[in-house]
Image: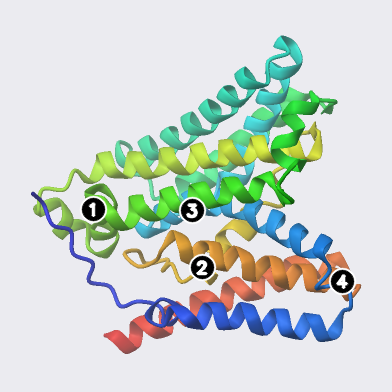
Amino acid sequence: MREAAVISQPNPLQRIPGVAMVLVLLICAVLAVLSDSFLSLGNILNVLRQASLTFFIASGLTLVVLTAGLDLSVGANVALSACIAGTVIHKTGSPALGILTGLACGGIVGLLNGIMVTALRIPSFIATYGMLWVLNGLTYWYMAGETLHGFPAGFRQIGSGYLFGLPIPVYLLLVFLGIGTLFAQRTIWGQEIYAIGANPVAARLSGIPVARRLLLVYAVSGTMAGLASIIFLSRLNSAEADIGESLTLPAIAAVLIGGTSLFGGVGTVFGTFIGALILTLVLNGMNLLSVSANWQPLVTGIIVILAVWLDMKTRRRAQ
């Protein structure tokens, strides 16, 4: 049996897991003081729902980043998958078939990314950046300026419904958080992914099928983008070509804020959930405090820069 050892130095948020939760509580305390609306039940549920939407994309992306790769196509993948799934639902009247189509579309895109990275040996940044533009072009051509809207009420419950007072996406978040954590932390495949990110040459020499594992993580990332497309489609009750343009940066930010290293080998799916929650709280606070939405991309970008700087500083100290 192969044993995959992770040799990278962890991010401070992973070295002391409580730090991330303390940061969440600190942000909550500040917002509770600054806004009377923050602690309202409606706002708390909205934060959880928004964090779950970011998490669905970011969880699959986490596995890619753990291998020292990057998937910049996730937002465009969500858009294409949502538009195709919406068309299938409209044409057939079957939400189940539409859901399967969205998941399949996302998974195929992810698999193509993996093939470019493994078989063609294109750096993941370039491969997925190129795929982003390919998917954007296909989506705008496919939609031809039209908007799909008006989906069955049962389908809409996936993104906007409640069960026992909690939004359904929150239940889905808990399910995939558990699956992702068990896969990454408790399976041989998961440990092999960590080993690839820590040292791909050593991983290959130890007998780990690096190419197959990379195909797996990109396929998972694409499939989770497909899942996110279904959630967004049912939540918005509409699909148009630009639905995914604002989704990639928050997903990357959630991964990095959660302690996953861009250099690979370090990170957890649970950390990504905390990162999504922190990012959502910050943006929610800006909305409650009537800060212009135009500033939100700037704030997200600053958070990404700080997370990468912290990661690099930690690695230098470890060396």
Q: What residue appears at the point 26 percent right and 39 percent down from the top-left corner?
A: 212
Label 3 Cα neighbours within 10 Å, binned few <14 / some 14-19 / many ≥20: many
Chain-order first, disc 2 or disc 4: 2
SS under mark 4: helix
The amino acid pointed to by label 4 is: Leu
In the foreground, 171 or 73:
171
Q: Seen in the image, is 150 located left or right of residue 170?
A: right
- Nearer to us of marks 1 and 4 is 4
* Residue placed under numbered mark 2 in the picture: 256
Q: Residue at x 50, y 80 (%)?
A: 309
Q: Amino acid at mark 1?
A: Glu
Marks 3 & 1, CB-CB < 8 Å contact:
no
User: Which of marks 1 and 2 precedes in the sequence?
Assistant: 1
Residue, disc 1: 192
> In front of the other: label 4 or label 3?
3
Q: Residue at x 18, y 64 (%)?
A: 5
Q: Residues within 10 Å of mark 2 (few under 14, many from 20)?
A: many
Label 3 – label 2 distance at C-alpha: 17 Å
Q: Looking at the picture, does residue 238 appear above or below residue 18? A: above
On the image, which quarter does residue 105 sit in?
top right
Q: Quadrant of residue 313?
A: bottom left
Identify the mark nearer the N-term, 3 or 2.
3
Between the residue at mark 4 and the residue at mark 3, the CA separation in whole angstroms equals 28 Å
Amino acid at circle 2: Leu
> What label sits on residue 177 in the rendered view?
3
Q: CA distance from mark 2 to mark 4?
A: 25 Å
Distance from Cα at disc 2 to Cα at disc 1: 21 Å
Give coordinates of residue 139: x percent, y percent.
69, 30
Nearer the camera: disc 3 or disc 2: 3
Q: Which residue is mark 4?
A: 288
